[in-house]
Amino acid sequence: MVTPAFAAAWFLPFATPIALWIAWSDMRAMRIPNQAVLLLVLVFLFVGPFVLSFEDWAWRWTHLLVVLVAGFILNVIGQTGAGDAKYAAAMAPMIAQEDLISVMILVAGTLPAALVTHRLFGAVPAIRRLTPDWASWGKKDDFPFGLALSGILLLYLVLSVKY
């Protein structure tokens, strides 16, 4: 039987640079590149069959669909950005269904931590001088959610490998 730890160990090296790219892009321009989201989906498409059973790999595509529909609805009612919705959907197949409660706990901790960290770093003059053109620094009513989503994905994969 293929374990979530085995799959996470294989997804992690491919997902890490994509997640970092998305976090950086969202902080810099308040945009999540479609190419990065597509690349994450391609990682699941091509790595998934080698690290998951075929049945599990096939069913996990429903994770993408369910999260995409939920994200679309949240976007329509103005509760999230389209890029955030697409990114969350692209992340979803990498998450084992049996880990859903653990991921919700990660969400509950990572969201406020990312928000506070972003706001604190934005208040440091030296960091602001290094990143003067970052759009996220000037957004008091908005937050680069890609930063938090990247943290959630990477923490989930790292913790899954460990346990």
Image (tube, grey):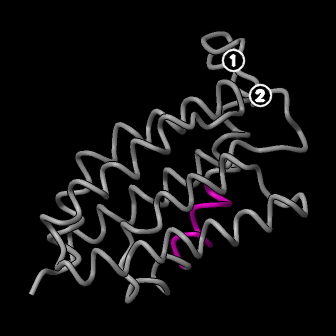
Segment tinted magenta in the rendering:
105-113
In terms of secondary structure, where does tag 2 sit?
helix
Q: Where's residue 99, x and y in %?
A: 40, 83
Pointer 2 or 1: first along the chain: 1
In the rendered structure, find residue 128 and report the number of the disc placed on it. Answer: 1
Residue at 80% x, 66% y: name it.
74
Q: Where's residue 30, x and y in %?
A: 72, 33
Question: Dominant secondary structure of the magenta stretch?
Answer: helix
Q: Is disc 1 surrounded by few (<14), some (14 to 19) or many (20+) residues within 10 Å?
A: some
The alpha-carbon separation of the residues under discs 2 and 1 comes to 8 Å
Residue at 67% x, 40% y: name it.
118
Residue at 56% x, 79% y: name it.
104
Q: Which residue is mark 2?
A: 137
Q: Where's residue 56, x and y in %?
A: 27, 82
Does the magenta-highlighted stretch encompass residue 109?
yes
Query: Closer to the camera, 119 or 23?
Result: 23
In the rendered structure, find residue 19 and report the number of the disc placed on it. Answer: none
Which residue appears farthest toward the left when viewing the image?
1
Q: Is residue 102 above or below residue 11?
A: below
Q: Quadrant of the N terminus?
A: bottom left
Three-letter code for the amino acid on which mark 1 is drawn: Arg
**Image depth: mark 2 or mark 1 in front:** 2
Does the magenta-highlighted stretch encompass residue 46?
no
Task: Please say if the residues under marks 2 and 1 sit with CB atoms less than 8 Å apart.
Answer: yes
**Picture quarter containing residue 58?**
bottom left
Q: Is residue 56 above or below residue 40?
A: below
